Image: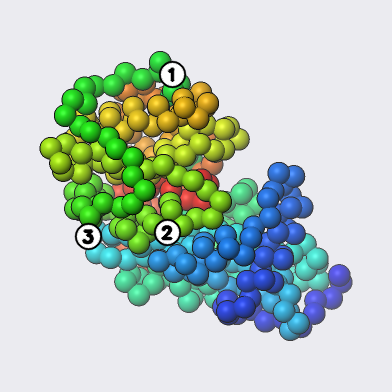
C-alpha cells in the first residue's frame, strides 16, 4: 500500500473493539506461531471491566479499520500513601499494511503522543508513571521517541518444587484456600503496603477482576491466618512464563515481620505445583523488596529472564531511581500470567 487512506488519530469509542480485535489478532498471529486469538470477552475484561480504567488511542481509517493502537491498562496504586494511578503499556500494534506510505515517525509514535498528553501527568488526575515489558523493537522506538527508560532487567526466583525448599517453622499459621475475598483483606493490605512507596492496590474490586473474572484462566488463592488474623495472601496458577511451564506465584502480600506466614504460603504453593505435575515453583519480585533475600534463604535461586521493565515518566517528582527503589510489583501487575 503506497498511499495511506484517510484516517484520524483519536481515543477509543464504544464499538471500536471489533475492529481493534480484527487488527490485533491478525498482527500477532503473523509474528507468533503459538498465538491464540483474543476473544471479545477477554478484551472487554482487560479494558472495559478493569476497575482502574482503560487508556486507548487509535489510528483509524474513515471506514473503520484500525491501523494502529497505543494502549494501556490502568492500575490503582498507593503512591507515598496517596491514591493514584499507574498504567501498564500493552497491545501496541501497527498493521503492516499501513507501515508503508508514512514518513517516520510511524504510527506507534504518533498514537503515543496524544496518549501521553491525555493520560500522563501528575497524580491524582493523571498517571505519573507508565510501565511495561516491551518487545525489543518497541523498546528501541520507545526510548528514542517516547521517553522510555530502563528500570531493571527482570530476574526470576526459581526453586524445585520437590525437595528444594528450606522453610522455617510455620507453627500457628493456618493456610486455607478460598473462592471469595475475606472481609479483612483491606486490613492486611494496609499493613503489607507500609514498606513501599508505590504499590498496586489489592482491594476486593481489583482482586476479583484480576483473578476471578478473567476469562479462560483459573487462579488458586490461599489465605494465611494466625490466631484468626489474616497475615498473608498468595495467588498461584500453573502456566507458561518465560518459555517454561511452571507453578507460578502470581501475587504475594504478607504482613511485614511474619516470616512464618511467608513460609506457610510458599509450602502451599510448592504443594500446588507438585499436584499440578510441574517441577519448578517460580515468581518475580523486585530485587529491592524485603522478600527478595528471604526467598533465596528458603531455597529459591535468582535466574535471568528474557524480560526487562521500562517506565515512561510523566512527572519530574518520581525519577527512575525512585521508582526502582520504592515500587513493589508482582507477576499479577503484568499481563504475563
Marks 2 and 3, the one that precedes in the sequence = 3
Marks 1 and 2, the one that precedes in the sequence = 1
x, y percent for residue 49: 47, 67
Question: How far apart, in angstroms, are the residues tagged by discs 1 and 2?
Answer: 32 Å
Query: Does residue 151 appear in this view?
Result: no
Above or below 19: residue 143: above
Residue at image mark 1: 162
Which of the 4 image quadrants contains residue 152? top left
Above or below 196: residue 109: below
1 vs 3, front mark: 1
Which of these two is toward me, 122 or 336? Answer: 336
Which of these two is toward me, 7 or 176? Answer: 176
Q: Element under label 2?
A: helix
Residue at image mark 2: 209
Q: Residue at x 46, y 25 (%)?
A: 274
Q: Element under label 1?
A: loop
Asked if labels 3 and 2 touch by Cβ distance under 8 angstroms, the answer is no
Question: How far apart, in angstroms, are the residues tagged by discs 2 and 3?
Answer: 23 Å
Amino acid at each position: 500500500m503506497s498511499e495511506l487512506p484517510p484516517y484520524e488519530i483519536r481515543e477509543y469509542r464504544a464499538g471500536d473493539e471489533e475492529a481493534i480485535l480484527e487488527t490485533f489478532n491478525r498482527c500477532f498471529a503473523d509474528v507468533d506461531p503459538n498465538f491464540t486469538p483474543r476473544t471479545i470477552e477477554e478484551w472487554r475484561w482487560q479494558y472495559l471491566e478493569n476497575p482502574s480504567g482503560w487508556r486507548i488511542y487509535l489510528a483509524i481509517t474513515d471506514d473503520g479499520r484500525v491501523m494502529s493502537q497505543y494502549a494501556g491498562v490502568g492500575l490503582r496504586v498507593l503512591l507515598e500513601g496517596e491514591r493514584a494511578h499507574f498504567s501498564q503499556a500493552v497491545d501496541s500494534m501497527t498493521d503492516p499494511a499501513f507501515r508503508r506510505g508514512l514518513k517516520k515517525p510511524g504510527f506507534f509514535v504518533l498514537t503515543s503522543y496524544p496518549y501521553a498528553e491525555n493520560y500522563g501527568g501528575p497524580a491524582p488526575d493523571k498517571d505519573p508513571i507508565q510501565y511495561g515489558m516491551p518487545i525489543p523493537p518497541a523498546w528501541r522506538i520507545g526510548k528514542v521517541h517516547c521517553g522510555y527508560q530502563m528500570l531493571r532487567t527482570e530476574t526470576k526466583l526459581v526453586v524445585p518444587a520437590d525437595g528444594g525448599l528450606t522453610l522455617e517453622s510455620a507453627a500457628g499459621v493456618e493456610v486455607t484456600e478460598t473462592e471469595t475475598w475475606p472481609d479483612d483483606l483491606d486490613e492486611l493490605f494496609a499493613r503489607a503496603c507500609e514498606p513501599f512507596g508505590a504499590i498496586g492496590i489489592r482491594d476486593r474490586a481489583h482482586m476479583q477482576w484480576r483473578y476471578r473474572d478473567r476469562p479462560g484462566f483459573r487462579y488458586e488463592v490461599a489465605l494465611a491466618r494466625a490466631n484468626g488474623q489474616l497475615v498473608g495472601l498468595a495467588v498461584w496458577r500453573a502456566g507458561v512464563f518465560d518459555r517454561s511451564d511452571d507453578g507460578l506465584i502470581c501475587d504475594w502480600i504478607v504482613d511485614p515481620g511474619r516470616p512464618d506466614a511467608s513460609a506457610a504460603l510458599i509450602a502451599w504453593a510448592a504443594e500446588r505445583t507438585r499436584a499440578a505435575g510441574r517441577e519448578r515453583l517460580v515468581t518475580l519480585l523486585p530485587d529491592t523488596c524485603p522478600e527478595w533475600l528471604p526467598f533465596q534463604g528458603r531455597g529459591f535461586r535468582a535466574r535471568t529472564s528474557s524480560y526487562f521493565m521500562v517506565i515512561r515518566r510523566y512527572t519530574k517528582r518520581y525519577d527512575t531511581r525512585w521508582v526502582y527503589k520504592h515500587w513493589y510489583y508482582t507477576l499479577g501487575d503484568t499481563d504475563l500470567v
